[in-house]
Image (cartoon, grey):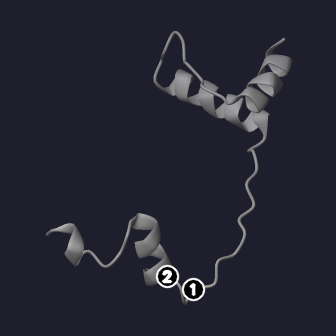
Amino acid sequence: MNTSEQSISSLTGFNMQARDDIVVTKDTVGYLPTAMCLTQALMIQNTLDLDDIVCVFDQALYAKTAEITW
């Protein structure tokens, strides 16, 4: 297919054409409670009988996690 046959400019253009009749609503994003994340990680570690487990957090969650572990 050559570019002169392309009617939609990009993925964004496609999404705009394909979904223009659907109302977009704002999402709310939040963190799970830090203690819940740590408890879940420890359960996985114990279930799999691991010596160590690695947890990766963004900066905000890491700060809370460090505060709890100290």
The Cα–Cα distance between marks 2 and 1, rounded to whole angstroms, is 6 Å
Q: Which mark is residue 57?
A: none
Q: Amino acid at mark 1?
A: Ile
Q: Residues within 10 Å of mark 2 (few under 14, many from 20)?
A: few
Which of the two residues, 63 or 12, is positioned nearer the viewer here? 12
Going 50% across and 27% down the picture, which residue do you hit?
Answer: 47
SS state under label 1: loop
Going 63% across and 84% down the picture, which residue do you hit?
Answer: 23
- Residue 35, image quadrant: top right
- Residue 67, image quadrant: top right
Image x and y of residue 57, in percent: 65, 28
Q: Disc 2 designates what residue?
A: 19
Which of the two residues, 36 or 21, is positioned nearer the viewer here? 21
Vertical side of 44 occupied by 13: above or below: below
SS state under label 2: loop
Q: Amino acid at mark 2?
A: Arg
Q: Quadrant of the C terminus?
A: top right
Going 78% across and 41% down the picture, which residue do you hit?
Answer: 33
In the displayed structure image, the side of residue 30 where residue 51 appears, left or right: left
Going 43% across and 82% down the picture, which residue do you hit?
Answer: 18
